[in-house]
Image (tube, coloured by chain):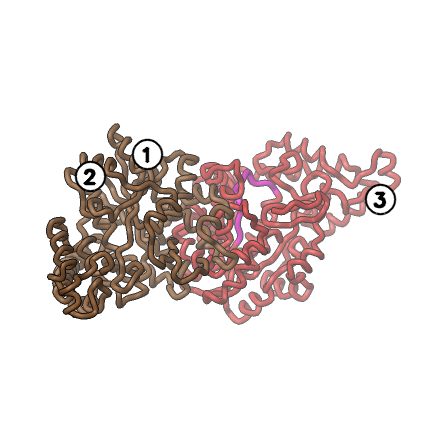
Chain colours: A brown, B red
Amino acid sequence: MEGEERNEMLVTPWEVRGKVDYERLIKEFGTQPITPTLLERIRRYTGELHIQLRRGIFFSHRDLDVVLDLYDKGVKFVLYTGRGPSGPVHIGHLIPWIFTRYLQEKFNTRLYFQMTDDEKFLVDDKLSLEDTRRFAYENALDLIALGFDPEKTFIIFDVKDIDVLYDIALEVAKRITYSTARATFGFQESTNIGWIFWPALQAAPCFIHAKLTGENVPALIPAAIDQDPYWRVTRDVATKIGYYKPAQIHCRFLPGLGPGGKMSASMPETSIFTTDPPNIVKRKIWNAFTGGRATVEEQRKLGGNPMMCTIFQYYVYLFEEDDAKLAERERRCKNGELLCGECKSDLAERVNRFLEEHRKKREKARDMLDKFYIKR
Amino acid sequence: MEGEERNEMLVTPWEVRGKVDYERLIKEFGTQPITPTLLERIRRYTGELHIQLRRGIFFSHRDLDVVLDLYDKGVKFVLYTGRGPSGPVHIGHLIPWIFTRYLQEKFNTRLYFQMTDDEKFLVDDKLSLEDTRRFAYENALDLIALGFDPEKTFIIFDVKDIDVLYDIALEVAKRITYSTARATFGFQESTNIGWIFWPALQAAPCFIHAKLTGENVPALIPAAIDQDPYWRVTRDVATKIGYYKPAQIHCRFLPGLGPGGKMSASMPETSIFTTDPPNIVKRKIWNAFTGGRATVEEQRKLGGNPMMCTIFQYYVYLFEEDDAKLAERERRCKNGELLCGECKSDLAERVNRFLEEHRKKREKARDMLDKFYIKR
């Protein structure tokens, strides 16, 4: 919400720009890195490590160790994450959801998923409540398509479900001063009063399981690290109102297909939406920023640079599960065997195969939506 | 919300103190006085003028003339008022409700009544949501006891009924900046974020009739003048979201039984609660601040001063409907015929008769409460 130099790293719940330095974020936000010891503790329960853990896509946490300590003693946890429905879903949005689905399966636990149609209305002058409501339902189809368990997954549509959130939000809001909210979120004189209250609404699902079931267990929140400020204030309030502090596990942003920056719906040419038809996907991937050289000759001779290549990141995040094959792709790129054309073409095929399957499941989800509504 | 000299007049939605200068309030708040012309326009529809109009208890307005212009042309209006359920109801609370009931009957119109259990929770450190919920239901019995039409009266309990308010509140909140809210309500750095959002919730019932029925008509709000800041911001937003500006008709505060200040639940010895048993009522009235002299002899000789007498105000506001008899009481006081003892004893009898009847209706109201719930 504040004016900064264009190249400066800025990570807030409403804006992410510049080159993101994740080590610096851990320091600045005061979170903990996910250590090999912690990974080993997770592996003990999951049997295998998800690629997003193996590859450090989820890289930081708060109290994940505390949640595991409790779990060791037989205290369960619930998962909580969400989505701001301001437009269609792209692959970057799916990354933490895919990981969340893995956690649900391995730990056999409930997920509360918040669709923040109220927030997106409040923060975007151009969006009506009808717009955000429509996006919320469409986005829910993408979530359901990933295979969440309808018995254990509860999608909270803020406006529709405000009756289950409001009393908890009031308990939270009463304990957050304007001063704290301003310092945490950068609110200004021109900020509307709905937006100022809204952090209490994002806090509420942390405690909804206890309210609905009477079972007081912690919430574990897998989400991109830009949402961290919300949990900082929520954690301060939690114990005052008799609940566990919510724990978090933070992921990196999937890069967009352009030179730098996360995949963002506001830059549609560098984002792959789940509803993009195959030829559009091909075009976007074909125009992507890579680590390739200026000419084929040069690349054959000097090799490419996968570390700065957006295409390679797609293999890392989602489209090459096999670590050996990923290493092989990296090796072939670096020594000039693999040219960008082949690599892009491979990726486009994999993405289109994935999206074709996803869209089938997404259409089936239309009839299942009400199974995921929160029960009262 | 701001520190001021104890004797200074202060009129805010949360605090009223000092001697209230109603002429000055009209100027400072920028409202209009209720003129004889306006009273005549009302009389044309009501046939008679309610004592609270005849006696200037309702003394100020915004857009009452506009509402009557529309009514002349066949556009109806709805009534809206409310209560902050922070404790039991006293006679001061009943004054505008009695007038509202008269308007409902004479104009055959709907009343939306807001029980702000959320607000009272947010602004009072000592009250829990359970406390304000309990007061809200108990207070509703006092309202119903006054004879409101269950077919046309809808009590909104904010927390229970948040689902019908929230979308409208969001539309309002998006259009009120922190800067405006701070200037209007005196919010500070230490104010909690729920309280800052809350004015949008008090605005919502102004527009709920249009939302629920599709019939876009103005709301007329009979209430004490301390609530005026809410309507100022609501009026600025109303036309932007396609509704009529809410109109207001403002009343004076019933004085407490002590020397100066409105009847306030926070000073129980100078307030008569609807649940006070007869002997308590007698004691409170007996201890009241009057316009009497130091000795009986002096009073016989010099007469009393009804203008500074709290007891006399009770006859004016509610307990002597007959203007001639009221004038006679005033005359007898002034010339020393009527002593305070007799006057107090008369009033205690009338108040106890009124309350006995009220409590019977109040108990009957328990079984009718759900008839007054808002329909979805």
Q: Chain of mark 1?
A: A
Left or right: B122 as drawn, with respect to A274: right
Amino acid on which the number 2 mark rests in the picture: Asn
- How far apart are the alpha carbons under marks 3 and 1? 72 Å
Q: Which mark is residue B335?
A: 3
Tell me, for residue A216, which label it has, or none. 1
Q: Residue type at mark 1: give it.
A: Asn
Can residue B351 be spotted in the picture? yes
Count residues near mark 1 (Cα–Cα under 10 Å), then give few for <14, some for 14-19, many for 20+: some
Look at the image and give the residue range highlighted in magenta.
B81-91
Numbered circle sitting on residue A300: none
Judged from the image, the secondary structure of the residue bearing numbered disc 3 is loop
In the image, what residue occupies the spot 41% across and 53% down? B166
For disc 2, the neighbor class at 10 Å (few under 14, some 14 to 19, many from 20) is: some
Question: Foreground: A370 or B370?
Answer: A370
- The residue carrying mark 2 is A108
Residue at 40 percent across and 62 percent down: it is A6
Residue at coordinates 87% horizontally, 34% vertically from top-left?
B297
